[in-house]
Amino acid sequence: MGGLHCEAISSNLHAEATGDTVSPAAAVWDLRLKFPEGEAFVFKDLSFSVKRGEKLLVLGPSGSGKSTLLQVLGGIVPGLVEVPMRCSGQVLPASWGMLFQDPDAQFCMPYVDEELAFVLENRGVAREEMLPRMHDVLRKVGLDLKEIHLPIGTLSQGMKQRLALASILLMDPDVLLLDEPSALLDPEGRRQIWEAVSEVAEDRTLIIVEHRIEELLDLGLVDRVALFGPSGQLLGQGAPEELFVRCRKELGEYGIWHPGVWSHFRFSAGSQIEQGESIQPGSGPFLPSAERLDRPIIELSEFRGFRGHQKVIQVERAEVYAGDFIAVTGPNGAGKSSLLLALMGLLPSEGSYLLLGERFGGKRLRKRQVQSLSKRIGFVFQNPEFQFVENRVDQEIGFSLREEGISPEEIRQRVDHALDQFGLAGLEQRHPYQLSLGQKRRLSVAGAAVLKRPVLLLDEPTFGQDAVNTFAILNLCEDLRRSGVAIVMVTHEEQIAEAVATRRWEVREGTLTDYGYTDRGTRLPHHICEAGMAEAML
Amino acid sequence: MNTWLAPSAITWMHRANPVLKLLFVIGLFFVALFTHRTDFMFYQAVLFTLLLFWQSGYSFWKVLLLVLSFGLVFISSSSTMILFGKGDVLWWEWGLFRITEESFYRGIHIGFKSVTIASEGLLFVLTTSSVDMFYALMQKIKLPPKYAYSFMASIRLLPMVWEEFLIRRNALRIRGARSLKGPRGWIAGIKMYAVPLLSQSIRRAHRVAVAMEAKAFDGNGRRTYYYPSRFSRYDPLAAAIFIAAVIAALALSDGLPLFHITDVRYSANT
């Protein structure tokens, strides 16, 4: 990598040079940075500095270089990750620690105590001092473990992230760099990590990059917000209250989860309700006539799913009707994903499972059954990459159409339509892995939905997505729902369950509870919903 | 899964220092390698298998399951020599196959050799955790920490790869990706799994590496150790067990010889 590296100058020297009375905790002047494979500069002549003790939040759209800036400020770029960059001057923090996004990719040891010991060993701390220090940092981040020789794999994602914070605290950093630490956590985990961060924030400088900022702002932790544009330019900065009013439009555009972002979406979903559109029978291949709409597509009674010999999901009674948008909520590990896998015939089950009047399930797993179930149910996995089977976007969408034996001419038409509908036009030739996070997610939905199967199951499709992508996926699901597809979506997003879905299931400790129709579900003028309601009343 | 893999008892062999065990096991490999007396080889195989039952700390049934697989090791390593080896006293011939007395004994000799080496290796693996071993190697024979930690970090990643494999398998079943028959289907099938699993693993490994370096890990610098690696009274005990096993095998082959073959190697003048 032939890039010129910055000359790091000590903060004192720079303070003298510029006449600053208070030296910055971290700063960079006239930064130019470009990825070797990229065409444009990520940053062009950017000067940025963070005061000592300041709590700074950096916002911007995906791909605006926020994480890269964080890595430059900490010295990871170009120190540990080689990226060509140049700047006229830089202040590196005297001591810093960085919390990363992926809770599973921050640890190198199998046990909690060994992982914490790793940092202490690196710093050459004497063995006798190790245990008290470990207990001290674990208490600071609110991880009260009775026994600290505990496998990291048994912790929840939120606990792992707090453990990562604890291990960073062992380095006693002046500056904490936080790279979207709550993006892959559920709401409970998000609340806990931000509480832990605010516990340890005193006397430290915080530089936070994050998309999900509701919990963060609730704590009143941030005193300055910097907003970046799509091509790495600094659009504005200021106190949160002031900036959010001034840049409301940009925040919405860039998909930042700012407070009040859902109220906009609720409005657009509401407008569809007022149009009073009813479901179009016959637009889905498996729903030929109106009377079939009154019968449930899926009927479960006394249904139980197993992993090995252990019962992981139990459903007393549940039905799915055409045009339902069911949100499945509940804590991690409660059995939501197991429910979906059991419905696909991938887990052994007992009890009655009727799909379009046909009986499925059983103690033995059969390949044939998975095949015939997946002809009727589309499935979207949590990680899109795992479900891609083709090397090109258009072939990926057309894959299940070809398996159905549809004529090439019609396949082309339907793929073109899907490319437009899912915002993937112009990307036909790309490899699915080369797409952005949001595009991959839309492609995975497109691949599962192009056949218009009567049911679409989605496992946390909005997880880790920004607001723009989340709303795009919800709108696509809503379109499918109105065409008569039943949507069953596992989600942690309370707003989806309350305002977007028409019905709500909750899974707790392996048991499904049907909470019936949401407000939106009861307001919908669909005859199916009324029929369903009438039945529910009985 | 973890409870199944954990030993049910901690034996002397667990408490002995991994470096000492490793040196002994390597030494024992060489003893087995240069044993040409079939009786001595046979008793080594028997005694080290018994040692596995006694000192591995796993329940009888789990060890038995592993030892039964030695049968496969025995057959696969001995059969080639039995069927194709050189020899003068012909027992049976059919086409290319030619079993002679010499090749038969040499075959089972090699079978015993494989079983011996397998049980010695298994004894080491079952009584040594990877973390213990790398801590001992770093402290006792100055293995650079960058190698030790890259191994330990990658061992942590393995279960995640397995989980992702299961997810991918489910996804392919649902998508109905049919596998072709024959070698081309095989290659296509491997690609179906390798591409997503590798791309995930490479990205994760890179992130772990950056996270490790961000925690002030420099790979070679001076460091302290959370787990001290010391020699203890269990080390002479473990050494005594290993040495006693070899001496007992030698004594038994003298006192109770079954095969009466002093050198199993082929020599043309017999």
Image (tube, rainbow, N blue to C red):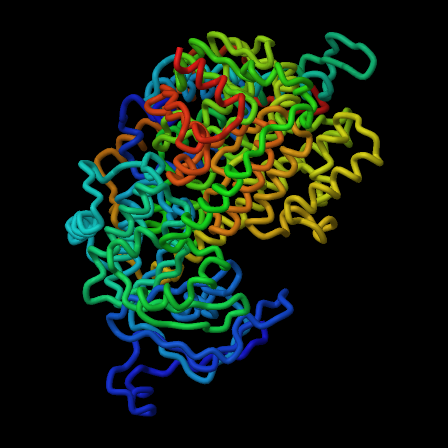
The answer to whether A431 appears left or right of A248 in the picture is right
Q: Residue at x 41, y 18 (%)?
A: A313
Q: Residue at x 57, y 43 (%)?
A: A441
Determine if residue B143 is in view.
no
The answer to whether B88 appears left or right of A217 in the picture is right
The answer to whether B184 appears left or right of B121 in the picture is right
Q: Which part of the image, by quadrant, shows the N terminus of chain A? A: bottom right
From the top left corner, tell me how far across and down residue B144 is, in percent: 40, 56
| Above or below A278: residue A363 | above
Q: Residue at x 73, y 36 (%)?
A: A398
Question: In this view of the protein, which residue sits in the foreground, B217 or A342?
Answer: A342
Residue B107 in which image quadrant: top right
From the top left corner, tell me how far across and down residue A20 is, in percent: 28, 87
Q: In this figure, what is the number of numbered marks?
A: 0
Question: In this view of the protein, which residue sits in the foreground, A45 or B43?
Answer: A45
From the top left corner, tell me how far across and down residue A300 is, in percent: 48, 13
Q: Which part of the image, by quadrant, shows the C terminus of chain A? A: top left
The answer to whether A470 appears left or right of B173 in the picture is left
Q: Residue at x 20, y 55 (%)?
A: A199
